[in-house]
Amino acid sequence: MTFDMFQEYIEEHILEGWKSDVELDVAMVTKNNGVQLRGLYIKSKEMNVSPAIYLDEYYSYYLKGESLEEIIRRIREEYEWKISRVADYHFKLEKFEYVKDRIIYRLVNYKKNEEILEDCPYLKLYDLALTFRWVAHSDDIGISTALVTNQEMEAWGISMNELLLAARENTPRLFPAQMVDMDEMIQRAGVCMPMDHSAIPMYIMTNRQEVNGASVLLYDDVLQTFALKKKTDFYILPSSIHEVILVPSDRIDNPSDLFTMVEDANRTVVALGDILSDSVYYYNREKNQIIPVTEEKRIV
């Protein structure tokens, strides 16, 4: 069964014995880094909010052998979960005061998201862009957020500075930072590896939810506190939008090796929608400043 046939089957059978008086729509949705997914929308007349259910993921389950009946059941469960968590907020978007304490920021790649950035407020940071979202719900099961658009900014009548101030306060509060020693993480995963005391220590910086954790880079004092504790500056490897890897600068003789690590990971390991950057950054603890390591500064 092709993807188009799969979509037609879902559209034909998803409402059977479940819902009536609703409309179905399928549209292409541009996600992070220009990744396009096919979103299924179940639109009820009673609500003017309709979360997207991405069929691409469910098609992959079908290709792995999951039955169509099970897939339909899971789509319905996802819809009910999402609608229960955004229903309380759809009517509150008219005023900024209703969502002010739920505004967060997120780091994405600038070049890969130029199309999306045309329709939303953002700040450019080197080869990255700081975008803004509002959190509909966050719990142990999942996180529901939506991009803040230029249309909403205009309706709220607020400045970029007001939006940024709200995000700077909320993001660390809702998504606290965490540092994880990579060796400890490997041990917790149950992977047995011989201890090599000459190995370069690496630290994973993310948030507790481990979702879009690269944004922790911009939290006040997090990098500086950690760098002062370790008594070293750091190279920053953008592992993905979900985390970055910190490498002590005093243990690196040839930074060009770090570029190779990042580029290789982005080509072979990291999903297209999760890539943050091919760059390498340097954190100076005395200046409390992040700067990019440019191509010209590679040590070859």
Image (cartoon, rainbow, N blue to C red):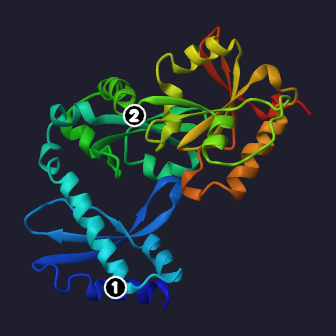
The kind of residue on which mark 1 rests is: Glu
The secondary structure type at the circle numbered 1 is helix
In percent of width and height, residue 200 lies at 79, 30
| C-alpha gap between disc 2 and disc 1 | 36 Å
Q: Which residue is mark 1?
A: 69
Give the residue displayed 46% in from the left and 72% down from the top: 56
Within 10 Å of the Cα at label 1, are there few (<14), some (14-19), or many (20+) other Cα atoms? Answer: few
Question: Residue 9, image x and y in percent?
Answer: 35, 89
> Compared with residue 14, is residue 219 higher up or lower down, i.e. above or below?
above
Relative to 250, does residue 114 appear above or below in the rendering? below
Q: Could one spot residue 127 in this view of the protein?
A: no
| Image coordinates for residue 265, horizontal then vertical, percent | 71, 50
Q: Is residue 82 above or below residue 104?
A: below
Q: Residue at x 50, y 26 (%)?
A: 218
* Residue drawn at point x = 54 percent, y = 44 percent: 241
Q: Earlier in the sequence, mark 2 or mark 1?
A: 1
| Lateral position of residue 227 relative to residue 100, left or right | right
* Helix, strand or loop status at disc 2: loop
Residue for badge 2: 175
Question: At 50% across and 88% down in the image, what residue appears?
Answer: 2
Looking at the image, residue 172 lies above or below residue 84: above
